[in-house]
Image (cartoon, rainbow, N blue to C red):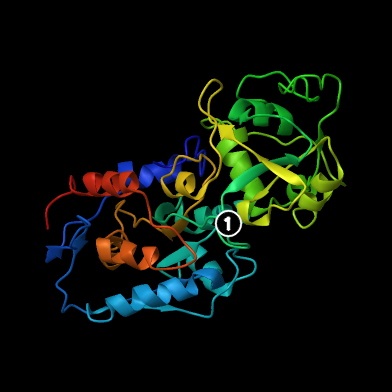
Amino acid sequence: MMAKGKRAIMTRTIKTAVFLLILIPACAGARHPSSGLCARNPTDKALISGSVPPILAPLLGKWRAELSGTGLSVETGPPGPPQGALDPGLAAFLDGKRDFAFLTREIAEEDLARFRRAHGTDPVVIPVAGGSWTRFGYVDPVVMIVNAANPIRSLSFAQIDAIFSTSRLRGYTPITDWGQAGVAGWQGRPIRLVGGDAWASAESARALTVRRWVLSVGNRVGTWREASGTGSEADNVERVVRDPLAIAFTGAGHVLPGTRVVPVMVKAGGRPVMPTRDAVANGRYPLSRTVDLVVARRPDGTIAPQVARFAGYLLSKKGQDAVEGDDSFLPLTRAQLLQARRMLRTQPSC
């Protein structure tokens, strides 16, 4: 299942909306095997262009090779960082000059605004792979870490919200010491946020994930506690190692000895989940991230047939087999795929 609490483009609603609202146009031809998506006759030729981040380029190469005999050609320029200001290919997509973009992070706020200016609507964000586990620098899940000496057992989303935000949209009063967070015998010991430069101005990819999935609720956007000058994601883990009262978030692939990953749960009273490989692979860990295909709707609300055809392949058994055979990413869960295909099978027949 998708991580709970995700996402108004994201209060996590856009990723859910792709399965609930995507309209695939009727087309001459057959449905793509295993996907339920309308696909043109395999002999029909089509070319689509987009952008791809460097860490996804090898997997895209496998997908492209599988598609080579179908008549669908997928073209990308040189791989670039998944931000429009840094990658001309992604910028071209945001401006409506390319057909798709792959993202390995939450879409940046400035990129979202740029897309809306060009298209007049939000993008459709389609999960196509289940992210990574503990591979450094990839799409590893976001984890909450404390010093190894801290005995805290778990944190709920509401507690995280009360620690990191001023808005506290999940209903808790501010949590500023470890006793308030439930650590027995630690009453009065202050919680020290580290890594605050990751959200002091332009938010990092993980800061965006935490704000959109945890600090925000529905259409209400959460706001961060001020913690500038406490380091960035480049050094926050080392700061936690040195400070028994510190807390930070990072990627599962960035954890160091001297820190401890805290199990998390969406709702208080639920079962805390550690980001084990199984919990990430089966979607139980609620801060697992995904690799996404981002596309635009046409003025009539549909997705261009050749782009839908590409999405159909990525969601097909062959597309997911390529992910499973890759060392860097996990395939989508069965629940995610079934949900996508079930909704797509309700679209008009080809």
Q: Is residue 54 left or right of residue 30?
A: right
Q: Quadrant of residue 223?
A: top right
Q: Position of residue 231 (x, y in %)?
A: 83, 50
In the rendered image, the quadrant that contains the C terminus is: bottom left
For the point 24% across and 49% down, the residue is: 341
Determine the secondary structure under disc 1.
loop
Q: Which residue is mark 1?
A: 134
Q: Position of residue 24 (x, y in %)?
A: 24, 54
Q: Depth check: 9 or 158 in front?
A: 158
Q: Depth check: 109 or 243 in front?
A: 243
Q: Is residue 129 left or right of residue 11?
A: left
For the point 72% across and 23% down, the residue is: 181
In the rendered image, the quadrant that contains the N terminus is: top left
Q: Depth check: 191 or 167 in front?
A: 191
Q: Quadrant of residue 160?
A: top right
Q: Is residue 4 left or right of residue 22?
A: right
In the rendered structure, which amino acid carries the disc numbered 1?
Answer: Thr
For the point 74% across and 50% down, the residue is: 198
